[in-house]
Image (spheres, rainbow, N blue to C red):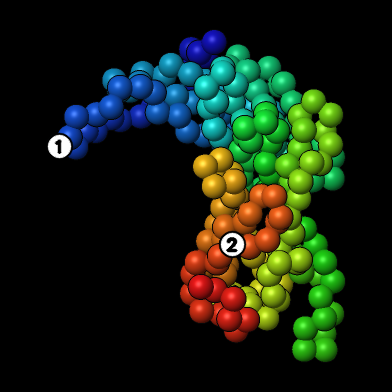
Amino acid sequence: MIPLDFLLQVEVEFGSGTPQPGVTIFNHCNDIVGYDLDGNLVLAIEAPSRVSDCKVLGDGRVLYVGGSRARLLSLDGEVLWTSPDGLAVHHSASMMPSGNVLLVCREYQEIDQDGEVRTWQGDRLVEVDITTNEETWSWSTFDYYNTIDYDIYQTNHWNDWTHFNDAHYVESDNSIYISCRHLSRITRIDYDTGEIVYNLGMDLPSGVTT
């Protein structure tokens, strides 16, 4: 249902090319909204928490991240699934071909660097079966990245060491690709083995980037 008092107004501008038909979906605070080419609001879903990432799935569901949770919603806003307790989800959630959900989560470990032990915040990928909430696959930066690699220009780099912006499974090569902001790195992971196929990005002290 489209609320009559929804305040967000948009302006539509076209470039030199012909616009593709359809609806543009984006998040606005606690709402997931969609506008047609004439600037008319055609979709409005009020989410249980502030939305930081949303994807409209082809089966009439919406997958979004907000408030350290991932949720599946129906187009009328009904909550169909919420990620389990204890997973600090951030930035990204995406569907796997199996129907599971792949989550980007914060992870914390004590790291001794230069004789000082600090709590580092890294990232963990977690695949969850939405019918049982069981973890079916996981991958941690602390297991596969080297802590000698960090952003030297970042104040207190251990507080947000890696900061994944996205993770996505590609069925054609059975790989998960991740975008790591603070290491300026794209990593391809073999899904079956969990091993890194390659890192693409800047040169870092560990020398593992290719």
When the figure is inspected, residue 171 is found, relative to residue 184, above or below; the finding is above
Tag 2 residue: 197
Amino acid at pointer 2: Val
Which amino acid type corresponds to the residue marked 1 in the rendered image?
Answer: Ser
Q: Position of residue 151 (x, y in %)?
A: 58, 75
Task: Please indicate, yes or no, whether residue 7 appears anywhere in the rendered image.
Answer: no
Viewer-closest of 137 and 142: 137
The quadrant the N terminus occupies is: top right
**Real-space Cα separation, disc 2 to disc 1, in angstroms:** 41 Å
Residue at the spot 41% in from the left edge and 19% down from the top edge: 41
Q: In this picture, is 135 found above or below 162?
A: above
Q: Mark 2 or mark 1, which is nearer to you?
A: 2
Q: For the residue labelled by badge 2, is the local secondary structure a helix, a strand or a loop?
A: strand
Q: Position of residue 167 (x, y in %)?
A: 59, 49
Does label 2 or label 1 sit earlier along the sequence? 1
- Location of mark 1 (residue): 16
